[in-house]
Amino acid sequence: MPVSSIRESEVLERRSALDRPAVVFKNVSLSFDDKTVLRDVSFTLLPGHTKIILGASGSGKSTILKLILGLLKPDGGEIWVHGSRVDGMSEVELMKVRGHLGMVFQEGALFDSLTVAENVGYKLYEETDMALDDVRRRVEEVLGFVRLSEHIDKMPSALSGGQRRRVAIARAMAFKPPTLLYDEATTGLDPITATTIDEEIVKLRDVENVSSIVVTHQLRDAFFVATHEAVRDGGAIEITPADPQKCDEAEFIMLKDGVITFEGNAAELRSSTDPYIQTFLS
Amino acid sequence: MLTHWLKAALYEVQEYMRLQGQTVRGIFSRPFYFHDVVEQFDEIGLGSLTVVLLTGFFTGAVLALQTGITLDQFGARPFVGRLISASMIKELGPVLTGLMLAGRIGSGIAAELGSMVVTDQINALRALGTDPVRKLVVPRVLAGFFMAPVLTVISDTVGILGGWLIAVYQLRVASSLYWTSITEALYLQDAWMGILKPFFLGYVIVTIGCHVGLRTSGGTQGVGRSTTAAVVAASVAVIAVDFFVTRLLITLLY
């Protein structure tokens, strides 16, 4: 098959993958030894939408992200990522699916031995045949997006906690994945820094049309992401309160002991009479 | 209790064997991270040079001192070179270099990979589409496998030089006599024995370091535990593997 046809088929395959739901969980269960981590968890993330997964520590929130990435395998159920079923895939097959997913880990998980530029461009440097100049340009572009251009040649240890998280976001978005997963991206940060991270999440979703799963137990950040949108005003991007339709595209999932106890939008969550949710919100 | 321990031990062995399988596959298939391999050759090879030079030199020197006294009882002091070369090349060079590498490389690898595990960097690598075994383990194993013999030869050389210094200036053995006794006592089989053993030792030290590091859990405390475990396991493995490989090589070479 000629190279151009291969590229064309790859592009078509990628395009059709992006038309499908970004992530689908069907009755997913997982246990470690005798402890049930997730039980019959089902949800669907549509392209360009946001799922905000709330829950206490140990409720299984981060596990969901690891299952999506194939870092863990479920005991039962089905997990689909952009039209590919990933729960039974081998590590080699998963590498292709992971090209659709960017992950922001708790504490950033930046590579200590690499500079900010090398961290952000890691996948492009190591796993693609993109020209080095092009990689550098893309790195500068995404660091500009998260407003960290001046730190491009620093080591991660020279950055503050908030800057490290933003570099982690830049690394996750550098290869333009259609879906981003945020694992406690604002935990441990002061409210002002946390808001800058929230704004990056909103910007990526609305400007780059990225589907997002935000795992957090910080209600303030969860509601910020759900109730704001990014709009282009000339060259600048502004964060404004979202209209009701946009608010509906951000759905909350409340996890309790590995079971979904609530699924709905921000207004429905606020008005829920469930005692656990009430305690969580108070 | 015993069943539990046995199960855990068997699981460790299974995981260790699995890592070795993945490593061998990683060596002979793509993607191959060439610049990481070069970096590890530098880190493991050049980085260990000082400690190997010092250990080799003083071992050779102290061997000359000790054997000088013993040989005097038989009036055989001029044969000190023969004893030093045989001991250094066949046994002390490989084993001491192995032990030094276990302390320096085994602990370093376990600590580095262990830290990467507990800070989610290994998961981040996988999420970014990189196989951690290919990226982290393969370069280290190749560097350990090929640099251990080089370091051993260097250790043997400086050990013999250290022995020469003591033999000439302390034991008053003629320099020419020292070198003659070394060449006379050396057989090709001894050289093979001395050069082949470090390949096994280097491989074992690095694979143990990688295995223990990648199986780290329990935060920074876990990293400390892994580092200790890697040094202990690699040091014991050096002695044990040395015995079995020596036994095998004696059968094959002599």
Image: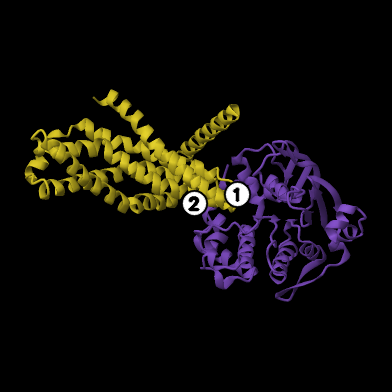
Chain colours: A purple, B yellow
Amino acid identity at mark 2: Glu
Amino acid identity at mark 1: Asn
Most foreground residue, A106 or A133: A106
Q: x and y percent of residue B223 in the render? A: 53, 49
Name the quadrant of the C terminus of chain A. Answer: bottom right
Mark 1 or mark 2, which is nearer the start of the sequence? Answer: 2
Q: Identify the residue under disc 2.
A: B112
Question: Which of label 2 and label 1 is nearer to you?
Answer: 2
Q: Residue at x 64, y 65 (%)?
A: A166
Q: Chain of mark 1?
A: B
Name the quadrant of the N terminus of chain A. Answer: top right
Can I make out residue B18 in this image?
Answer: yes
Q: Residue at x 60, y 49 (%)?
A: B123
Instruction: Name the image quarter holding residue B176.
Output: top left
The reply, left or right, for residue A146 in relation to residue B160 is: right
Q: Identify the residue under disc 1.
A: B123
Q: x and y percent of residue A252 in the render? A: 82, 55
Most foreground residue, B172 or B87: B172
Marks 2 and 1 in Cβ contact (< 8 Å): no
Residue at far top of view: B251
